[in-house]
Image (tube, rainbow, N blue to C red):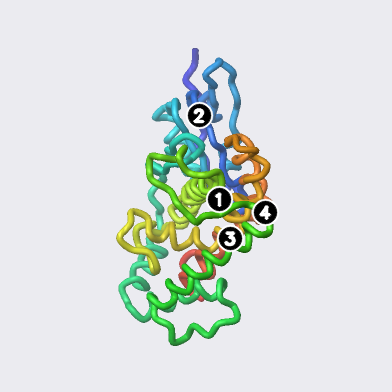
Amino acid sequence: MGQPLIIRTQLSNIPMLRDRYPFLYLEHGRMEIDDSSVKWISADGKHFRLPAAEISTILLGPGTSITHEAVKILASINATVCWVGDDSLVFYAVGQAPTANTYNLKKQLALAADPEKSLAVAKKMFASRFPQADIRDKTLKELMVMEGQRVRACYLELAEKYKVGWKGRSYVPGEFQLSDMTNRLITSSNAALYALCSSIIHSLGFDPRVGFIHSGSPLPFVYDVADLYKEDLVFDLAFSLTAQMCGEYDRYKVLEEFKNRLLEYDFMGRCTKDVLDLMGIKKQGKES
């Protein structure tokens, strides 16, 4: 047999991040390369060719393996690989090709290092959540208190809207099954959203560890960005699905509904633009 024909792909020839399908979740199988294409072999021996250049993020769940060559090809087309737990419940690690341009990272670090500029970025994030409030003179602590009150009020409004009993947000790490249905749905959707935000942040050349609101956690910038979208993509989804679950958590329905919302929301395009706007960047290497 001849040598595999691996064609080097130029990033200029593949779709922009905002134009790609948001994510593909895979479990119990193997990812490898067949000539120049990425192939998935399921546990029951079925083969699927994946349009990897059209996918932003590949989430690898339990029971998966991936070859060195597959990682190499995915890195060359700027497709992020995330290793996650069952149903994306836990985000373990991310594999991302190093960005060739450190401009965005330098801009992020410069903003985070300056207290006034860092607070200004945080206020940009809060402004969309408090469109009627004057937050110009608010401290970060005051804004975080306001946000906590807003989220609790949001839970109560959604519980009333969807006729769901609600006793408050609760989740004990490692004890997913002990939570009530709505809390389980919030937890699983949050984890998937964090993985996608991590993918976008890495792909744009920013550092998920350098945040503006959150701190003292592994991925503060991921949590900063994810909070912009939770009301529509996570909270409303969780409360609306609670009754439909009929007491039985249906992993496939959750993933399907979550993906549908991402596509309707144009999440990849919107999140990419929002992150660049927050950093004051119109295009790669250009300030606004």
- Residue 27: mark in rendering: 2
Residue kind at label 2, given as amino acid type: Glu
Q: What residue is shown with label 1?
A: 12
Nearer-N-terminus badge (3/4): 4
Residue 286 visible somewhere in the drawing = no
Does the CB distance between marks 2 and 1 fall below 8 Å? no
Residue 244 vertical placement versus 194 (above, below) = above
Instruction: Give the CA distance from mark 3 to mark 4.
Output: 17 Å
Horizontal arrangement in the rendering, residue 127 relative to residue 122 (left or right): right
Residue at horizontal 30%, vertical 60%?
Answer: 216
Q: Is 261 left, or right, of 171 in this rendering? A: right
Tag 2: Cα neighbours inside 10 Å, few (<14), some, or many (≥20)?
A: some
Q: For the point 54% across and 36% down, which residue is it?
A: 25
Amino acid under disc 4: Lys
Task: From the image, tell me which residue sits under label 4.
Answer: 163
Position of residue 223 measured from the top left corner of the image (x, y, whole percent): 43, 58
Neighbourhood count class around disc 4 (C-alpha, 10 Å): few under 14, some 14–19, many 20 upward: few
Type of residue at label 1? Ser
Answer with mark 1 or mark 3, whichever residue precedes in sequence. 1
Label 4 to label 1, Cα distance in Å?
A: 49 Å
Residue 14 vs residue 87, the one in the foreground = 87
Distance, label 2 to label 1, CA atoms, is 30 Å
Q: Nearer the viewer, mark 2 or mark 4?
A: 4
Mark sitting on residue 221:
none
